[in-house]
Image (cartoon, rainbow, N blue to C red):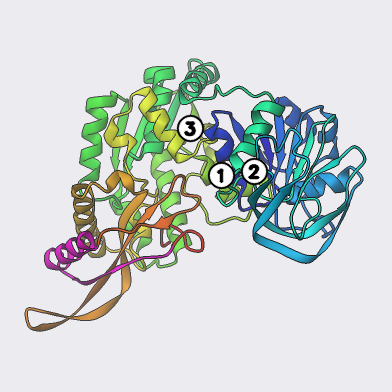
């Protein structure tokens, strides 16, 4: 495996994805990690990520310099390179000219890290500091017009520094550089697959649980469904899934999922209709974070009440994914900025006194889909578009009422039907409507109307860390708009969201 030290780069997750694309396991850890814990991870290599700080700033992120005594290859990227050079006796200063964007890389001395690259290639720079002198034992490898030491390395100790970012698409030879490090330098084997992951996870769950019982809040999404099936394969009927209908689901979703789980997965499931409890607590609430907290709190109250009816429960399972943890908990305490709270991170009330099982917590969404197919999850669930835990509660902007939910459900059903008919459902990461808290003037049947506005959101993505708005055909958009306005009473205008993530997020709340 490869360990990535999180120095706060916006590209941290991209580094992990690139490594995993080579079928090598990779984990992001905080710079505060104890050196013994890092050693216990048994990494074949360590990557020091980039970051926005300067090494001379107060409270700039730093990892124990003992990592340079482990005898493990280390690759420093951008700030990571500067930290390495500074820690080992080199000199770093504020650059006379900051370097952002494309730069031409001149490779004078490729060494093992830049092997198989042409003498000149493009790279992506993003730094305000530069290395002035190298530590003893290092030799320069490449330069740009503004950066004398764009790459440097110590052959004997297997330390490598890159001032540019090899993990981004803007560095065309970046994958080759990472391959050089992962396979030629670290001698990793490309043997991390979802088949091996499933086998290891099932063994770990079985050993951890023993003869005790596990409960899981099943939503019907791919994350909780894969989690449920994985645990079911490990311990069978010792797992009890609790499906809570919060009144914020899509049209006929509860009935459809109930049938699917009963027919295909044979899981031990308890179904609870708690819609009235959720809607009464949400009455008059418009703030999105308050909505999330209320929905999470009511869910746990309902869930806990049902869980008390099950004997010998010692474990709670959750379908938490890696991006959830990274966005919500700053990469395990690292300096990556928090984006927003997630419904399935940190939601375990202490009074329940249950041990947590999160078998997917180091996986990205597309990896979970592959895992689902590997263990036999039905295609309908594997390719189900992500649906937030708070459900339609965060897609009804403003106050949540039964009437507004009804309008949104009807619109959602039309959009899903048309997206599927056009063969776009699996091409999109998500496609859904948002009911806005404003109205607009329209004309229908020669009469003036003053009705609701619906925003259509459709994005493409690989892992939800970044996303781009989907360029849907105009005739598809026209069909959706026409059907929504004609068939859903109370809507007279449809708009299309053309913002990407970042700067926006996929969901509106």
* Secondary structure of residue under mark 3: strand
Q: Give the residue displayed 32% in from the left and 46% down from the top.
A: 427
Q: Give the residue displayed 31% in from the left and 36% down from the top.
A: 381
Q: Nearer the viewer, residue 248 or 322?
A: 322
Q: Which residue is mark 1?
A: 325
Q: Which stretch did the figure color magenta?
A: 474-499
Q: Residues within 10 Å of mark 2 (few under 14, many from 20)?
A: some
* Secondary structure of residue under mark 1: helix
Say if residue 309 shows up in the picture: no
How far apart are the two marked residues, 1 and 3, measured between alpha carbons? 17 Å
Upstream in the sequence, badge 1 or badge 3?
A: 3
How far apart are the two marked residues, 2 and 1, measured between alpha carbons? 7 Å
Residue 254's x, y, as percent?
24, 42
Q: Are marks 2 and 1 in contact (CB under 8 Å)?
A: yes
**Residue 478 included in the magenta stretch of the image:** yes
Q: Which mark is residue 316?
A: 3
* Secondary structure of residue under mark 2: helix
Q: Is residue 354 above or below residue 76?
A: above
Dot in front, 1 or 3: 1
């Amino acid at each position: 495996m490869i360990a990535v030290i999180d120095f706060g780069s916006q590209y941290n997750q991209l580094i992990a994805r690139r490594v995993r694309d080579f079928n090598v396991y990779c984990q992001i850890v905080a710079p505060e990690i104890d050196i013994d814990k890092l050693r216990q991870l048994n990494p074949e290599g360590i990557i020091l990520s980039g970051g926005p700080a300067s090494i001379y700033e107060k409270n700039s992120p730093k990892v124990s310099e003992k990592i340079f005594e482990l005898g493990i290859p280390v690759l420093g990227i951008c700030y990571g390179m500067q930290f390495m050079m500074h820690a080992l006796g080199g000199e770093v200063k504020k650059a006379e000219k900051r370097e952002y964007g494309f730069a031409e890389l001149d490779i004078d001395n490729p060494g093992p890290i830049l092997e198989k690259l042409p003498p000149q290639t493009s790279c992506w720079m993003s730094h305000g500091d530069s290395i002035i002198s190298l530590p003893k034992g290092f030799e320069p490898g490449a330069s740009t017009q503004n950066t004398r030491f764009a790459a440097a390395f110590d052959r004997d100790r297997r330390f490598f520094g890159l001032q540019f970012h090899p993990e981004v698409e803007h560095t065309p030879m970046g994958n080759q550089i990472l391959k050089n490090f992962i396979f030629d330098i670290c001698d990793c084997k490309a043997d991390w697959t979802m088949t091996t992951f499933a086998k290891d996870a099932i063994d770990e769950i079985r050993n951890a649980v023993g003869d005790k019982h596990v409960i899981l809040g099943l939503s019907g999404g791919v994350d909780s469904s894969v989690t449920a099936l994985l645990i079911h394969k490990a311990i069978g009927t010792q797992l009890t899934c609790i499906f809570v209908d919060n009144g914020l689901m899509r049209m006929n979703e509860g009935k459809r999922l109930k049938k699917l789980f009963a027919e295909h997965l044979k899981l031990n499931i308890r179904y609870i209709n708690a819609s009235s409890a959720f809607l009464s607590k949400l009455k008059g609430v418009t703030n999105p974070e308050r909505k999330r907290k209320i929905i999470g709190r009511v869910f746990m109250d309902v869930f806990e009440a049902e869980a008390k009816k099950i004997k010998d429960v010692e474990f709670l399972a959750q379908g938490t994914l890696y991006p959830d943890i990274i966005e919500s908990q700053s990469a395990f305490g690292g300096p990556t900025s928090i984006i927003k709270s997630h419904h399935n991170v940190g939601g375990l009330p202490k009074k329940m006194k249950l041990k947590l099982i999160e078998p997917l917590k180091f996986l990205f969404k597309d990896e979970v889909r592959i895992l689902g197919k590997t263990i036999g999850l039905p295609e309908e669930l594997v390719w189900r578009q992500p649906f937030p835990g708070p459900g339609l509660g965060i897609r009804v902007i403003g106050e949540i009422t039964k009437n507004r939910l009804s309008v949104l459900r009807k619109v959602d059903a039309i959009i899903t039907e048309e997206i599927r008919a056009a063969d776009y459902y699996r091409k999109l990461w998500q496609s859904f409507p948002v009911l806005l808290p404003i109205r607009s003037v329209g004309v229908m049947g020669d009469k003036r109307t003053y009705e609701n506005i619906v925003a259509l959101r459709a994005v493409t993505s690989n892992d939800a860390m970044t996303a781009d708005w989907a360029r849907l055909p105009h005739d598809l958009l026209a069909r959706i708009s026409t059907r929504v306005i004609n068939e859903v009473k109370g809507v007279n205008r449809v708009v299309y969201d053309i913002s990407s993530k970042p700067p926006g997020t996929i969901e509106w709340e």
